Image (cartoon, rainbow, N blue to C red):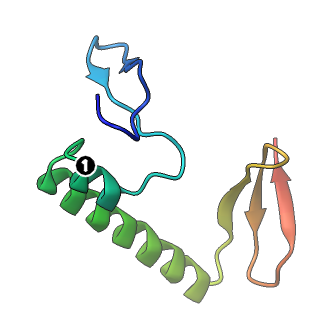
Amino acid sequence: MGTGVKKEPVILKSGRKVTVAKKNYSSKGLVQSGVISSRDYEMDNRATIAVSMAIKKAKVLGKPIAKYDRVTGMTYLEYIDGRREIIE
């Protein structure tokens, strides 16, 4: 496998093997190194834009946003006023 990809693939319950990128590798870097196709890169960009738009819409509507803190490992809801509610 190319750089930026974990050595062992993840095997799903269906038996399908999925290659996982290492942390801090962008899809742009992976497509340039030939690890993913340009179609995968385009799909990744579209998914990123869709998530960004969904978050913006939720903020406009005053809905809380679910977030994950990697440092503490906690999942929480962040409200428009900045208040956080831990999800257990």
Number of other residues with Cα within 10 Å of mark 1, as a class: few under 14, some 14 to 19, many 20 or more: few
The answer to whether residue 70 is left or right of residue 57 is right
Quarter in which the C terminus is drawn = top right
Report the side of 78 relative to 46 (left or right). right
The picture quadrant where one finds residue 52 is: bottom left
- The residue lying at 86 percent from left, 74 percent from top is 83
The residue drawn where x is 37% and y is 15% is 11
How many discs appear?
1
Location of mark 1 (residue): 33
Spot occupied by residue 7 in the image (x, y as percentages of width and height): 41, 22
- Residue under the image location 29 percent in, 28 percent down: 1
The spot of residue 73 in percent (x, y) is 79, 43
Secondary structure of the residue carrying numbered label 1: loop
* Residue drawn at the location 23% of the way across and 57% of the way down: 41
81 is higher (above) or lower (below) than 31: below
Depth order, front residue of 22/65:
22
- Hey, what amino acid is under mark 1? Ser
| Residue 72 location (% of width, % of height) | 85, 47
- Residue 9: x percent and y percent? 37, 20
